[in-house]
Amino acid sequence: MEDWKTRTKLVHSGIRRSQYGEVAEGIFMTQGFVYDSAEAAEARFLEAGPDEFIYARYGNPTVKMFEDRIAALEGAEDAFATASGMAAVNGALTSMLKAGDHVVAARALFGSCLYILEDVLTRFGVEVTFVDGTDLAQWKRAINKDTKAVFFETMSNPTLEVVDIPAVAKLARRVDAKVIVDNVFATPVFSRALEQGADVVVYSATKHIDGQGRALGGVILGTKEFIRKTVEPYLKHTGGSMSPFTAWIMLKGLETLDLRVRAQAATAQAMAEALQWDSRLERVIYPGLEQHPQHVLAGHMLEKPGTVLSLDIKGGKDAAFRFLNALKIMTISNNLGDAKSIVTHPATTTHQRLSEEQRAELGISPGLVRVSLGIEDSDDLIADVKQALDAV
């Protein structure tokens, strides 16, 4: 299996077939499992085997198939599937931290990630320092002997800043701090974060992995020791595990993941190039464009620069709203990575809880619109954006 190419892994890795020999993965919709004897129950609670299960919060055959498949894709030793992407972020951080520990995080983060770092962890005595994720000097100054973890999005939401994983990981190694990355925008197809120095990778499976707007889910990937000795005890007792039906949906999503994200990234590149000099825009943000500040870094770290771009429309919020309301194909929603193209106004939705000053510091202007490209025809999507700009 280690020699299989990506698309083969996405279809065949982790399959567990029952005695019926089903082609599609089985959905084991059960909260508990039966033991042949009291002695067998005792033995399993003492140490469950690799294909033995106790309770759905602890593990399930369908969920395990998803965990094994995404781990094979990512090149990780193990994975733990969670109820949502934010359950994965919270689980990865909270399971390993205690009062007095120190975390260094990039300032450019999704609003809910900021909430966990600013409000939840600090409430329990964890010190958090925020830095400009693209400035290695700030990382170097902030990381100290008490730092237990560094956290950042490999490509930030929604301004698409790219963080240098190997460089930050090198700084973290000096104090034995874990490098935890949210890899959603980079996708598990285009990024090899573990190879580049990350210790732990988290995904919102709600995004590209499902890719069809059906279910919430998340996953944490890392070493077997970290997943089973640190993450699993925390999540199985606090209840953030994935349901079997959701795991089955995610397995089906993985089968087409490579095909979808490659088509989406090609459309994102084409749209960025078509709009980069449009006079109605302040800027087009996409790592695949030469004017992007981390264009060269993105080329080294990512196979493709992703499926999302951001447009900063001249005229601020009013112009951005006119643009959104004039679109005929794209859907206004706050998800991303979907087969359908989706547009979002971050300042009034996903990053609304931030102050105006914080949004300005992150580059989230009133005219900024995040565009997640789907699998529709690229010419149709580009034409849709251009006619909506005409309406502005």
Image: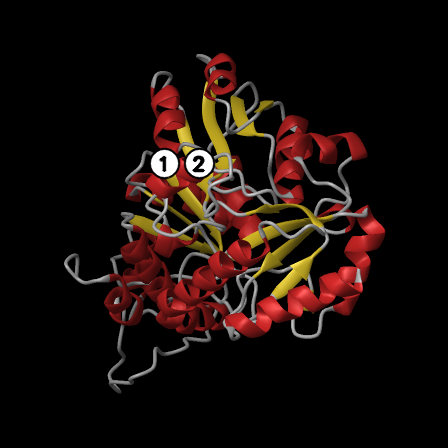
Q: Seen in the image, is 320 located left or right of residue 87?
A: right
Vertical order, 164 against 245 (above or below): above
Is 246 or 203 nearer to us in this picture?
Answer: 203
User: Alpha-carbon distance for marks 2 and 1?
Assistant: 6 Å
Residue indicated by mark 2: 180
Q: Is residue 239 visible?
A: no
Q: Position of residue 141 (x, y in %)?
A: 50, 12
Residue shown at the point (81%, 48%) measured from the top left: 315
Secondary structure type for disc 1? loop
Residue indicated by mark 1: 198
Vertical order, 188 against 32 (above or below): above
Q: Position of residue 117 (x, y in %)?
A: 62, 33
**Quarter holding residue 159:** top right
The quarter of the image holding the N terminus is bottom left
Residue shown at the point (34%, 50%) measured from the top left: 303
Dot 2: within a 10 Å radius of its alpha carbon, few (fewer than 14), some, or many (20 or more) residues?
Answer: many
Is 203 or 57 nearer to us in this picture?
Answer: 203
Image marks 2 and 1: residues in contact by CB distance under 8 Å = yes
